[in-house]
Image (cartoon, rainbow, N blue to C red):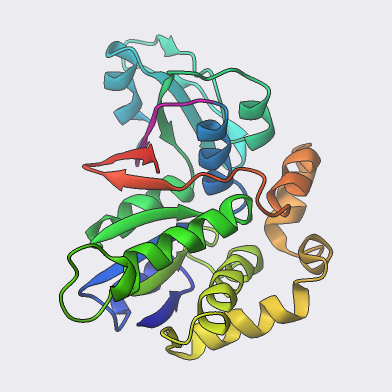
């Protein structure tokens, strides 16, 4: 099986692997980390949405709302001049402070939810972060390695790792998560092969950063952006490994926990 990386959503349509594959969507600062945290806190489903307007219908259907633009939580302005107040933003540490048992969450962010939706054309779409690294890689092996797939005929599924970046530009932190996934899958399982320069680069960067990935990303632009917004706790949490051992998977447009 092949491991390929798309460094931004803008590059995803130009990937080589387009059939028989799993795509992992990554936005470690902060959307995919926050999704993992929401499920860890008991959330029953998360609906990733593109526009803020899409949230209004889910509000009427009894969903809790989460929305972020530019790193900050935003409410929804209605055409009649009214406002729909949003309960949550994009903070994983905020989700973990709440009991979300049974909560259905409709969720729209600047980059991450759009990345998840972009990845929906895969045979299976998973959400990844440092927070669920080991559980995610276990799930990927179960989905992709032929001997582990019940009733599998022929070869296994390839893996595409889609980094969210920032507004279609490259970002360091998502690339490090991609490299960590590649290392766990390729080094410890000979059935995986690294494919393409982006995947090799991601692995090389991760091997340079793995002793302290947060420190390695100290100069990353989004780290500075979030720090200016007072989100240091989220930054620190997002670089910790295996804090939320859940694997969100997209099923008919809805993320559920596996």
Q: Residue at coordinates 60% horizontally, 43% vertically from top-left?
A: 244
Q: Is residue 175 visible?
A: yes
Could you say which is closer to the camera, residue 79 or residue 124?
Answer: 124
Q: Residue at coordinates 49% horizontally, 14% vertically from top-left?
A: 85
Residue 167 lies in magenta, yes or no?
A: no
| Quadrant of the snapshot with the C terminus | top left
Could you say which is closer to the camera, residue 209 or residue 68?
Answer: 209
Taking the image as shown, residue 152 lies to the left or right of residue 212, namely left
Q: Residue at coordinates 43% horizontally, 88% vertically from top-left?
A: 193
Instruction: Give the image quarter of residue 95.
Output: top right
Taking the image as shown, residue 180 lies to the left or right of residue 85, namely right
Instruction: Give the image quarter of residue 25.
Output: bottom left
Could you say which is closer to the camera, residue 7 or residue 149?
Answer: 149
| Quadrant of the snapshot with the N terminus | bottom left
Numbered circles on residues, count: 0
Q: Position of residue 58 (x, y in %)?
A: 30, 21
Q: Position of residue 256 (x, y in %)?
A: 36, 38
Q: Position of residue 228 (x, y in %)?
A: 78, 43
- From this view, report whether residue 238 is shown above or below residue 100: below
Q: Position of residue 167 (x, y in %)?
A: 50, 58
Identify the magenta region: 42-50
Instruction: Give the image quarter of residue 229.
Output: top right
Residue 46 lies in magenta, yes or no?
A: yes
- From this view, report whether residue 197 is shown above or below residue 67: below
Q: Residue at coordinates 42% horizontally, 88% vertically from top-left?
A: 195
Q: Is residue 27 visible?
A: no
- From this view, report whether residue 183 is shown above or below residue 107: below
């Amino acid at each position: 099986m092949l491991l390929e990386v798309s460094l931004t959503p803008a590059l995803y349509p130009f990937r080589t692997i387009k059939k028989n594959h799993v795509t992992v969507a990554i936005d470690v600062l902060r959307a995919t980390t926050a999704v993992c945290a929401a499920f860890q806190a008991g959330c029953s489903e998360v609906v990733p949405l593109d526009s803020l307007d899409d949230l209004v219908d889910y509000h009427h259907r009894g969903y809790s709302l989460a929305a972020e633009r530019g790193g900050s939580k935003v409410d929804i302005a209605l055409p009649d001049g009214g406002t729909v107040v949003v309960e949550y933003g994009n903070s994983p540490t905020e989700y973990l402070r709440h009991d979300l048992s049974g909560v259905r969450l409709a969720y729209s962010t600047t980059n991450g939810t759009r990345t998840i939706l972009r990845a929906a054309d895969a045979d299976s779409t998973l959400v990844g972060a440092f927070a669920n690294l080991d559980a995610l890689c276990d799930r990927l092996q179960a989905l992709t390695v032929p001997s582990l797939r019940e009733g599998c005929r022929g070869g296994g599924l390839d893996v595409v790792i889609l980094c969210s970046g920032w507004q279609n530009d490259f970002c360091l932190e998502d690339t490090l998560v991609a490299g960590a996934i590649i290392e766990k899958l390729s080094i410890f399982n000979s059935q995986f092969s690294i494919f393409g320069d982006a995947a090799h680069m991601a692995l090389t960067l991760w091997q340079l950063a793995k002793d302290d990935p947060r420190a390695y990303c100290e100069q990353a632009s989004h780290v500075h952006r979030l720090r200016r917004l007072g989100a240091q706790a989220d930054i620190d949490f997002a670089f910790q490994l295996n804090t939320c051992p859940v694997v969100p998977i997209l099923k008919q447009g809805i993320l559920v926990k596996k």
